[in-house]
Image (spheres, coloured by chain):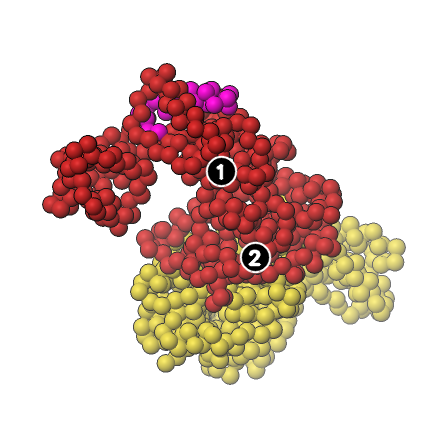
Chain colours: A yellow, B red
Amino acid sequence: MKRLVLKFGGTSVGSVEKIKKVAKIIKKRQEEGNEIIAIVSAMSGSTNVLLDKSKLISDNFDNEELDVLLSSGEQVSCALLSGAIIDLGLKSRSWMGWQIPILTDNNYSSAGIINIETKEIIKFISRKGVAIITGFQGISSSGRITTLGRGGSDLSAVAIAKFFNTDSCEIYTDVEGVYTTDPKTNKKAKKIDKISYEEMLEMASLGSKVMMPESVQASMINEIPVHVRSAFSGKKGTIITSESEINFKKLITGISYSKNDAKITLVGVVDKPGVAADIFEPLGKNNINIDMVIQNTSSDGKKTDVTFTIKREDISKTIKLIEKNKKYLKYDKIIHDDKVSKVSIIGAGMIANPGVTHQMFRSLANEKINILAISTSEIKISVLVEENETQTSVKALHKTFDLD
Amino acid sequence: MKRLVLKFGGTSVGSVEKIKKVAKIIKKRQEEGNEIIAIVSAMSGSTNVLLDKSKLISDNFDNEELDVLLSSGEQVSCALLSGAIIDLGLKSRSWMGWQIPILTDNNYSSAGIINIETKEIIKFISRKGVAIITGFQGISSSGRITTLGRGGSDLSAVAIAKFFNTDSCEIYTDVEGVYTTDPKTNKKAKKIDKISYEEMLEMASLGSKVMMPESVQASMINEIPVHVRSAFSGKKGTIITSESEINFKKLITGISYSKNDAKITLVGVVDKPGVAADIFEPLGKNNINIDMVIQNTSSDGKKTDVTFTIKREDISKTIKLIEKNKKYLKYDKIIHDDKVSKVSIIGAGMIANPGVTHQMFRSLANEKINILAISTSEIKISVLVEENETQTSVKALHKTFDLD
């Protein structure tokens, strides 16, 4: 008998009909001889409806009450799913975060899980009961409801897999798995069978919406392999696991790209210690998220250019902040380009393979694509290109690295 | 400093705008120097939306999961109200039934309150905090969420008033109070300043929708005076209290009437012991609710007529059940009238005043209204009339008993 942790996202339980389908999936998995623990998100859309109500009450709605409000969403979906499973003739019961309890810290709206009690639920599932657990929520040491913030239900699933000592965790969602690139814009995109945590982390950060980076990180830290799969097709999806579990046949696992980026260059910045800090400190304090930063060694030792990318909506705010500090920043001029995209190739295989970099640049050169900036990490190379060349770049790279 | 228990019904918190208004009412009451405990229902309509979802899952949705589902409604309204109060600059926090805890028995969907812990909340309100409590819900000894069933939030308010030793409890609702008769159909209806528990119980059972009979009974048993008032007008409403608190200037306090009644008469029933039981036992077993029952002494000692009233929707089911048992029931024929109404005059003052009965009948006779059946209790006289004469009857009686 195997113990399974199955997580169903908001779209998988987005309607009464879908909840009934999920109940059938769970029944089938139990009949195969498994113990089942299911983690459930709020029905898709319901969290936003609640959030909108809180905003109508106050622009600055109390964090602790917000958690009380939002946690009602999973309470609804869990009760409905448990009821649907009972209706199929199985034994089932729902557990709210506070009932287990899932103990968290006191960071309301972005709490971290400290401990999960397992005794009662283990007893229940060992007697053929299906345990349904609310994702995204827990209880603080002061007895108040908390929520986990971004990627919350996936984080719950990974933590539950860890505390219940299961081998893995399955994330049922509305896509078939993780793809080599976005399947909506590129028909040659292929489903990836296995991907390493590190690669998935890069994919997640760079715009693949399958799992939030926080959840991937949690599964990596706790060494819980995650199986991302469709709640509707029944097919195998993508397994996210450690590098050692993967036979890297290909250099590159996937290609991702960002949208809504903008590039700013400060030309003729005086090259002295602390200049980068002077530029970025006021931006950070004003919640402007800096992505790529490129600064070359200056040829004459006196002046250099600093280029960085930000989200497009922050561009006018950023320029104002820099101009305001012109007195002590000292630069010749600012130039900006608000229509750029970052295209990245990701693959743990590139660590042992120095040829990847020039292959990438050659592939783009063949398409006459101008590279505006370059940034690299151990398992990723990102280039900045003009936005209208994004798809051409992705297509070329997809072919070059044998992903078609 | 006075401790107030204020209960806000579903229509009073039916929208974000209304919740903001309720927050202002609470602020005002606290500024008057009171400690505030507010009990809140789910936003009007939301419980039905949840109930409909459960019905789409199963005709026989699990009771325990239904309580988990429905209790999310008050969680939402309490969090929003508490957030709105905090937004006004006050200290506030919400408590779910399980957090207090409000301990109930294990009768899911119609649980009874056993105990309410008060320590934490008393500490909070004594330090200028506004305590917001979910109505309608509690927690069973096995740690699962329960709901109280019909009239639930009013029951919560009365029980909280009792356990927190307050002098009274205020029920904020969408009407101005309890009226001498339905103000929608009778323009001469007047708001009642004070009414006894017993009278209110008769009014509630007979169709005044202000409070469920179960809640009136709870306030009577616990001797908690209830002030029913409008959440919007700010005016004083109706105080429901013990008879000893009321100066009965008038014989009759109010006039109520039922809708959707039907009358069945079994003609020529053999008059022997046990016959009434034989008639009503199969009906009771089939969940048919019998209201009035009239059986005269038979003139010849052999045969008599038995008349009773039921809800109109039960009429064909009732007739079928009786005909099925004709073998041992023995009667000559069944006649039925499915368009009748019960009109009642209610007043604790009638106990000491034998003249009320004939005054009532004379008043109706003057309007040429035919009385189909009569039923009396200590503080109530009900007559059955043809449905189309209901309003004429109410109007005549309203005038006769000085209520205009």
Q: In the figure, is residue A217 to the left or right of A190?
A: right
Q: In the figure, is residue A343 to the left or right of B396?
A: right
Residue A193 has which mark?
none
Total numbered badges shown on the rendered structure: 2
- Please identify the quadrant where the C terminus of chain A is shown: bottom left
- Please identify the quadrant where the N terminus of chain A is shown: bottom left
Residue B200 has which mark?
1
Residue toward you, B290 or A241: B290
Q: Distance between the residues labelled 2 and 1?
A: 30 Å
**Could you tell which of marks 2 and 1 lies nearer the N-terminus?**
2
Residue toward you, B389 or A133: B389
The magenta stretch spans residue B286: no
| Residues at discs 2 and 1 both on one chain | yes
Q: Quick check: A105 above or below B336?
A: below
Q: Quick check: A278 above or below B212?
A: below
Amino acid type of the residue tagged 2 in the rendering: Met
Which residue position holds label 2?
B96
The magenta stretch spans residue B388: yes
Q: Residue at x 28, y 44 (%)?
A: B288
Q: Which residue is drawn at 83% across and 67% down?
A: A274
Q: Residue at x 58, y 74 (%)?
A: A115
Q: Give the quarter of the image for residue B311.
A: top left
The subunit carrying tag 1 is B
Q: In this view of the protein, can residue B286 be seen by the observer?
A: no
State the residue lying farthest toward the right.
A327
Residue range of the region highlighted in magenta in the rendering: B383-404
Amino acid type of the residue tagged 1 in the rendering: Met
Q: From the viewer's perspective, is the residue at label 2 or at label 1 nearer? A: 1
Q: Give the quarter of the image for residue B386.
A: top left
